[in-house]
Amino acid sequence: MEKHYNHESGSGTHAGNGCHVGGGNIVQAGATLFQADLEKNAVADSASLYQLIYAGKGRMPGFGQDCAPKGKCTFGKRLTDEEVQQMTDYVLQQAANNWQVQQ
């Protein structure tokens, strides 16, 4: 997760916010970040989701520092391994809470 994202308040922006606002997906139906879709797409576990965020798949670009080939990866800021793990943990936590805003 990019450093300017605040997990506690849910404020800020991070990689993925453009396509996956609120856990949805504005680009591809059936590829949301809700638990049912994570399970259907075999990325409901930490290792598989980490790999998806790092390297990308299909229409989703990879965000990892060493993502390759370049055309498959984001043109924006690349994430460190730690940031990819933080994003993975965040997505899994939010999916478990059905993407409900925590008060």
Image (cartoon, rainbow, N blue to C red):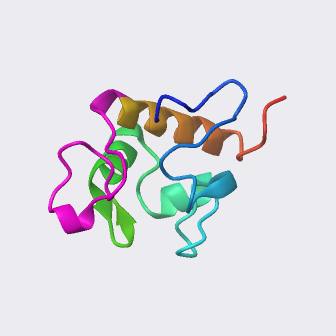
- By secondary structure, the bulk of the magenta-drawn segment is best described as loop
* Relative height, residue 24 to residue 1 (above, below): below
* Relative height, residue 82 to residue 21 (above, below): above
- As for residue 79 lying within the magenta part, the answer is yes
Q: Which residue is drawn at 71% across and 47% down?
A: 98
Query: Between 101 and 40, which is closer to the camera in this rendering?
Result: 101
Query: Between 48 and 6, which is closer to the camera in this rendering?
Result: 6
Image location of residue 90, percent across then percent down: 54, 35
Q: Residue at x 42, y 52 (%)?
A: 43
In the rendered structure, the answer to whether residue 69 lies left or right of residue 59 reads left
Image location of residue 8, percent across then percent down: 68, 24
* Relative height, residue 100 to residue 16 (above, below): above
Quadrant location, the C terminus: top right
Q: Residue at x 37, y 37 (%)?
A: 84
Query: Between 22 and 89, which is closer to the camera in this rendering?
Result: 22
Which of the 4 quarters of the picture holds residue 24? bottom right
Image location of residue 14, percent across then percent down: 52, 43
Segment colored magenta: 62-82
Q: Residue at x 63, y 37 (%)?
A: 12
Query: Between 60 and 40, which is closer to the camera in this rendering?
Result: 60
Which of the 4 quarters of the picture holds residue 56? bottom left
Which of the 4 quarters of the picture holds residue 88? top left
